[in-house]
Image (tube, helix red, strand yellow):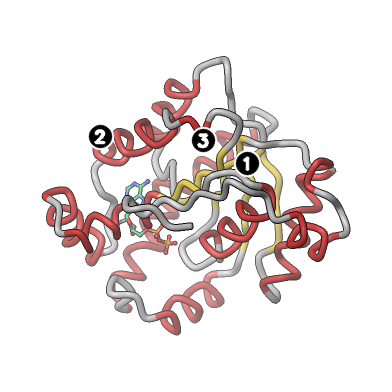
Amino acid sequence: MQTARGVTRHPTPDHGITDRASGIGHRALMGRRLLMLGPPGAGKGTQAEMLCRAIGIPHVSTGMMLRDHVERGTDLGARAKEIMDAGDLVPDDIVIAMVEERLSAEDAVCGFLLDGFPRTRAQAEALDHVLGSDRPLEVVINLMAPEEEVLQRILARGRSDDTEEAVRTRIAVYGEQTAPLIEFYEARGLLTQVDGVGGIDAVLARVVAVLAA
Ligand code: ADP
């Protein structure tokens, strides 16, 4: 279900998807407060969407929320569009405020999956602050895919911010600003690595397996 703000809600878990993926019912899954990291083009959006539908948690994607602002022609969208088309990061204060508002909604009390956020150390620290000690992150999934593979996938996808130059910038920005978060979460014992190469269902089965472990 798609809401006006580009946020997908999945009020009813679709147990079938999880069962098909791995034979594990959704109740066996441990974490409900999840974060998905990985380079642009690793397939985070696709996996996040399927996983959220399977286990009935909201999918919080800052990229989707920003694209929704662009489509609706809001002031924020007008500001963000140029930045996104160049492959740069939208300022931290903007995305932090968006995520803070989204996570304060009632459907995010028991769980959520963050996709595309945090992308900087400042965003990760702000997220800690927003979540506080009552509902800390439980699992951080690092979806891995080699650079040649992500480049090919993105260029085949053809979104408006998928020009070769913008994609190169995004990959560079990922390496400089976002990849260090892998260690940040590893140091807390939250990180699990998932191989993102393969068919959509095969990767989903790996994601579900690490959550059930
Ligand atoms: P991808 O899946 O290719 O990484 P996203 O849909 O997550 O792309 O994001 C698209 C663009 O939206 C980014 O290149 C960036 O400009 C902007 N954006 C999304 N999330 C954030 C964030 N957390 N901080 C700053 N900019 C963001």
Q: At label 3, which amino acid type do we have?
A: Asp
In this view, the residue in front, 13 or 142, is 13
Q: Residues within 10 Å of mark 2 (few under 14, many from 20)?
A: few
Residue at disc 2, CB closer than 8 Å to ligand 1: no
Label 3 vs 1, first from the N-terminus? 3
Between marks 3 and 1 in the image, the one whose residue lies nearer the viewer = 3
Image vertical order of residue 188 relative to residue 57, above or below: above
x, y percent for residue 101: 35, 32
In which quadrant of this rendering is ligand 1 seen? bottom left
x, y percent for residue 104: 42, 28
Q: Which residue is mark 2?
A: 93
Label 1 vs 2, first from the N-terminus? 2
Q: Which residue is mark 3?
A: 107
| SS at badge 3 | helix
* Left/right of residue 188 with respect to residue 42 in the rendered view: right
Q: At label 1, which amino acid type do we have?
A: Val
| SS at badge 1 | strand
| Mark number displayed over residue 185 | none
Label 2 vs 3, first from the N-terminus? 2
Q: Residue placed farthest to the right in the image?
A: 23
* Left/right of residue 94 with respect to residue 205 in the rendered view: left
In this view, the residue in front, 105 or 12, is 12
Q: Which residue is mark 1?
A: 140
Between marks 2 and 3 in the image, the one whose residue lies nearer the viewer = 3
